[in-house]
Amino acid sequence: MNFVEDSALFVNSGVEQPPMINPNAAALLKKAPQHLLQVHEYVEGIKAGNVTILSKAITLIESRLPAHQALAQQVVEACRPYGDKSVRIGITGVPGAGKSTFIEAFGKYLTKRGHRLAVLAIDPSSERSKGSILGDKTRMEELSTDPHAFIRPSPSAGSLGGVARKTRESIVLCEAAGFDTIFIETVGVGQSETAVHSMTDFFLLLMSSGAGDELQGIKRGIMEMSDMLVINKADGSNIDKASVAQAQYQSALRLFPLSESGWEPKALMVSSIEKTGLDDVLTQIEAYLTSTKESGYFARRRREQARYWMYETIDEALKSDFYHNPAVEAALAGYEQAVLAGKKSSFTAAKELLESYYKSGAFSF
Amino acid sequence: MNFVEDSALFVNSGVEQPPMINPNAAALLKKAPQHLLQVHEYVEGIKAGNVTILSKAITLIESRLPAHQALAQQVVEACRPYGDKSVRIGITGVPGAGKSTFIEAFGKYLTKRGHRLAVLAIDPSSERSKGSILGDKTRMEELSTDPHAFIRPSPSAGSLGGVARKTRESIVLCEAAGFDTIFIETVGVGQSETAVHSMTDFFLLLMSSGAGDELQGIKRGIMEMSDMLVINKADGSNIDKASVAQAQYQSALRLFPLSESGWEPKALMVSSIEKTGLDDVLTQIEAYLTSTKESGYFARRRREQARYWMYETIDEALKSDFYHNPAVEAALAGYEQAVLAGKKSSFTAAKELLESYYKSGAFSF
């Protein structure tokens, strides 16, 4: 693939010019808030580990401008061969579990051991109302000034499907930039955990010590998809409560069906303030990676995730095109009311809406 | 709505003729294995509680012939005003939990108390391989000869979406036929539990006493959607094991987040052979119904389920039309391989497939 010729900024395949004296780029700059580079400049910058260029590229991924999106796709495709090398860890927990302090503590623990860590977040705007705006650098002062860490705030808007795609593409760029560990952070209250689970190798659920009550806030099913439960705030006067919680969760975990990985999740205690228990967390994660890589589950799951996201993207697009169709938008509310009132069957309502959609012939592809 | 004129068998709106001397019906009979009646004949028969006609109508619902489907839709729509009056109970459990014996014991217990019970099953053929063919009358000899019970074997084929729709429409007919209690039975190993959960008022998970190990067979998340756990086979030498299982499950249930209904699920012990514990099961179900009807959750959930199924039907149809599109069918496997091999990104593959679909213009609506 020839990045220059494929580039939205292509002028002359014979000469590569810096964007500032590139008339097309200059034209684009009037519309675009940021300086656009050429595809190969993004790719080379990212491969060189230049986080400024990495940030610019992720901004392109998040941009709604078609020109940016086209450019972003080329950058992602070009980086793909250099990605897929990291360990992707999903971290979720209810607001109040101390996610930021844990990520900062565990993150520093990892970078001190020579790891390069990128922290991304999935937090669709639709779920913002439920609180906890993720990816805010000021939450992680130490980590955000750590040269071996890269913290990227959550995409500020969009459907879960859209945000999930942007995050998956950002993972590719971070991996190409040489980050060997990626945290994908999410709040444990929405649909986003399944999305995170489907793009990570290991899923960590963070709890504080209020077992039971606390789970009220957590979406059902999350505990069952977790590869590890971490009871945070196991310090000071809280230690006894934390041990009780750990025991309760550990026994609950035993009742869950074994996941396909064959891994038995443990409930661990940590103090993000006193930096205790972090060794266990790392040891467990490494044990999981060893066993799943030996069994072939790790690689198989990565491949299946890629296929999963192909189908997810298709299904998302089919629905999005249907529900944004003018004919459907005009009629949907009325049909929904008729169904809610029992005046029309779900099936008949669906059938009539589908007919008006396909007859409209107005498709965005 | 005039059922005669809308009927596939319409000859002459002035005269209603019995199908045997109706030339159109006679013509249809050559193609169709069963005697077709007119819409109003199905509806009146069903409303009169005629189970033979009810069975014929459900067979129409399950038929793939367009003429049958058109007729079935009219019958369902005509019965809808007389439905929606029963209590719908989803019953799932791994093969070996003793589902049939429990349904027979609990079913007889209910009919003896004057209830009229219909037992339907969701068991998509795609999941047959996982064993346990449901709805087999011979499993429930007493119940199948009970004049107050109606047992309908599972639709023998089709996608989950299709089978779920057929079951939902069969519920309408059974309710119009005066059955006040409907069991929807499923094996706890597939996707079908979510479907059952979305068409029932109460979800019962049947276990035998082998806590823990047994759950290996159960799909993750099912325990969390259950309104009641029933430990079966609490008899003979098994009683102690059953009590241990009950205690374990009860403590596990406490750790789950409370469902929207505000109901706290209990783990109960029964013996389907010795007919013990069935009182508790009924008492708990009645308590659930009372509290959810008072809180308004019961009615709200029914309405939301109808809306849910409108959107489910739409999403199913959009996907089905896409994946049955000749252009897509021809290209899909190649794209999937490219994605599995990491040669193409999920997103690019999806985008190209979507373009070829919408450009094809070949839609089944």
Image (cartoon, coloured by chain):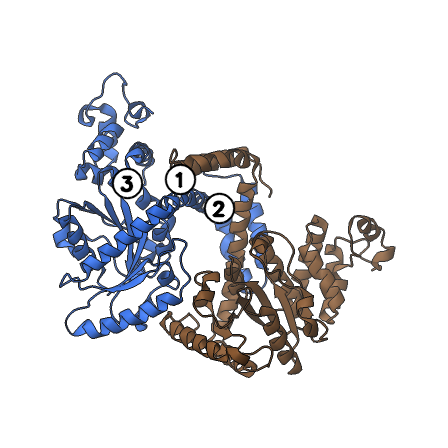
Chain colours: A brown, B blue
Residue B95 appearing in the image:
no
Name the foreground residue: A43 vs B229. B229
Residue B85 appearing in the image:
yes
Q: How far apart are marks 3 and 1 (CA)?
A: 17 Å
Q: Residue furthest right?
A: A21
Q: Is residue A93 left or right of residue B140?
A: right
- Residue sitting at x 15%, y 49%: B113
Dot 1 amino acid type: Ser
Dot 3 amino acid type: Lys
Q: How far apart are marks 2 and 1 (CA)?
A: 21 Å
Dot 2 amino acid type: Phe
Tell me, yes or no, whether the two marked residues, 3 and 2, touch with CB atoms within 8 Å. no
Residue A287 versus residue A190 in the image, above or below: below
- Mark 3 vs mark 1, foreground winner is 3
Q: Which residue lies furthest to the front in this view?
A: A237
Q: What element carries label 3?
A: loop
- Residue sitting at x 60%, y 78%: A273
Which residue position holds label 2? Answer: B322
Q: Is residue B269 left or right of residue A8?
A: left
